[in-house]
């Protein structure tokens, strides 16, 4: 099972270009007693993903979304929550996009990510709870 200590290691393996972003985040939050607040990091990751996709770097986006899929399938509850509420909800927030739109990322979603994408979308459009009701 992927836990909070392992989750971003996977992301850095998939996209080493996030190392500067990671180092700044880890330095800023290193004294946090309850662990690093990964939800806050996801908004920066999403912004970078938007820039990459706008620049035509689809291969990187594909690798990044593969990691998010793993977080959802193999992660502990905290990791899954960061993937859903941090990353997927972040991607759906049009204010963090730079040259892209939320819908531009749908093509890169795996089955589990697609399920949660729809759940987050239904929450904002219809007020439905973001729960796994399968």
Image: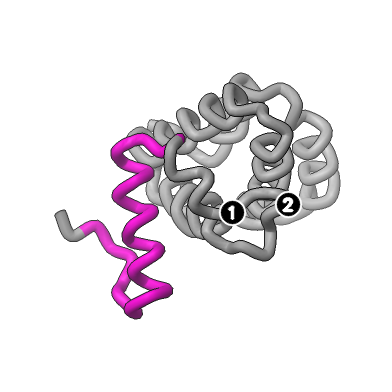
Q: Nearer the viewer, residue 56 or 69?
A: 56
Circle 1 packing at 10 Å, graded few (<14), some (14-19), many (20+), is some
Q: Position of residue 122 (x, y in %)?
A: 33, 68
Q: Nearer the viewer, residue 74 or 102?
A: 102
Circle 2 packing at 10 Å, graded few (<14), some (14-19), many (20+), is some
Q: Nearer the viewer, residue 90 or 98?
A: 98
The N terminus, quarter of image? top left
Q: Residue at x 58, y 31 (%)?
A: 61
- Asked whether, in this view, residue 8 is left or right of residue 84, the answer is right
Tell which residue pokes out farthest to the left in this image.
Answer: 134
* Membership of 111 in magenta stretch: yes
Instruction: Provide the major secondary structure of the magenta segment.
Output: helix
The C terminus, quarter of image? bottom left
Q: Position of residue 35 (x, y in %)?
A: 64, 50
Q: Residue at x 71, y 22 (%)?
A: 16
Q: In the image, which residues are magenta?
A: 108-132
- Asked whether, in this view, residue 22 is left or right of residue 68, the answer is right
| Mark 1 lies on residue | 101
Secondary structure beneath label 1 = loop
Which image quadrant is residue 10 in?
Answer: top right
- Position of 6 relative to 95 (above/below): above
Q: Position of residue 66 (x, y in %)?
A: 46, 29
- Position of 10 relative to 94 (above/below): above
* Membership of 47 in magenta stretch: no
Residue 98's label in the rendered image is 2
- Asked whether, in this view, residue 70 is left or right of residue 62, the answer is left
């Amino acid at each position: 099972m992927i836990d909070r200590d392992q989750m971003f290691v996977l992301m850095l393996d998939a996209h080493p270009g996030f190392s500067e972003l990671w180092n700044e985040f880890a330095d800023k939050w290193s004294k946090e007693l309850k662990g690093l607040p990964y939800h806050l990091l996801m908004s920066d990751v999403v912004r970078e993903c938007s820039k990459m996709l706008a620049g035509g770097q689809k291969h990187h986006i594909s690798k990044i979304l593969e990691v998010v899929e793993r977080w959802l399938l193999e992660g502990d509850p905290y990791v899954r929550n960061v993937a859903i509420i941090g990353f997927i909800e972040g991607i759906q927030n049009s204010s963090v996009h730079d040259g892209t739109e939320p819908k531009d990322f749908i093509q890169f979603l795996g089955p589990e990510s697609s399920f949660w994408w729809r759940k987050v979308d239904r929450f904002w459009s219809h007020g439905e709870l973001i729960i796994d009701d399968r």
